[in-house]
Amino acid sequence: MRELARRALAELVGTALLVGIGTAAIVGGARAGGTPQFLLALAWFAAVTLPILLVASRSGAHLNPAVSLALVLSGRTPSRWLAPYILAQLSGAFLGSLVVWAALGPGAHLGATLPAAGQLGLALLAEAVFTALLVLSVFVVSDVSSRWGAGPLLLPGTVVGIATYLIGPLSGSSLNPARSIAPGLLSGASSYLPAYVAAVLGAAVVPALLWRRRYPAGR
């Protein structure tokens, strides 16, 4: 129980950093008149990679309910960890968003993920595709990092950075229910949250089951 509590605390801190750094770049850039998309992509690469490097040895650095769900379904994480991890991730996301609110003042959306006008279906499809890619990148890291060192830990952040550059204007490039829920609820931009959460969690299931079939844990 004490070990699980330490893991959950690491997830809380890591997710707070992820959401805080990433959404601060969005809100701060908007207040400065806009930020080029490639700079936002770099900011999100850093927002994902930094906490992974900090807490990977403590909790595995899921930092995302979709990733935790996928790792449980693939057999790489005990099912009893799922609820504490998700609760910690949501708590960390709210903490990160509150820090952004306190530091920069309430923005129009606090970095909430919203679809482009009239493009909800396409936005959800893009979220699903890149969430599946993110989950696959996490499986690669979980299976090879012990042999290849810290290099593979850069892969999830790279996927998120590419997603931010390619689909950010279309969907907000969430790929993470906690990252969408906290800014969305705190800023009142919650209309699309059920659709985003369903798309992202649903997209995590298929690669998890396929990876488990092809590469069983502990093989």
Image (cartoon, grey):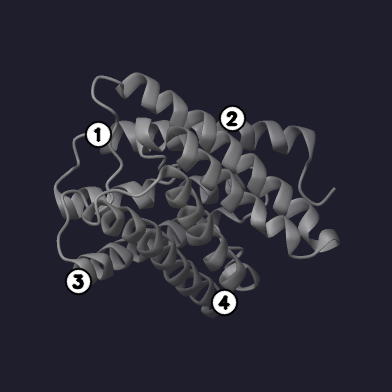
Between the C-alphas of marks 3 and 2, the distance is 38 Å
Q: Nearer the viewer, mark 1 or mark 3?
A: 3
Three-letter code, disc 2 = Val
Q: Nearer the viewer, mark 2 or mark 1?
A: 1
Q: Is residue 63 among what the camera can see?
A: no
Q: Which residue is mark 1?
A: 192
Three-letter code for the amino acid on which mark 3 is drawn: Ala
Q: Residue 3, labelled with which disc?
A: 4
What residue sits right under mark 2 in the picture?
A: 206
Q: Is residue 192 visible?
A: yes
Residues marked 2 and 4 touching at CB (< 8 Å) = no
Q: Which mark is residue 102?
A: 3
On the rendered structure, is 68 left or right of 92? right
N-terminal of the pair, mark 1 or mark 4, is 4
Front position among marks 2 and 4: 2
Residue at 67%, 52% in the rendered image: 76
Please indicate whether residue 28 sits to the left or right of residue 39 in the image: left
Calculate the distance from the C-alpha at mark 2 to the C-alpha at mark 1: 22 Å
Q: Are marks 4 and 3 in contact (CB under 8 Å)?
A: no
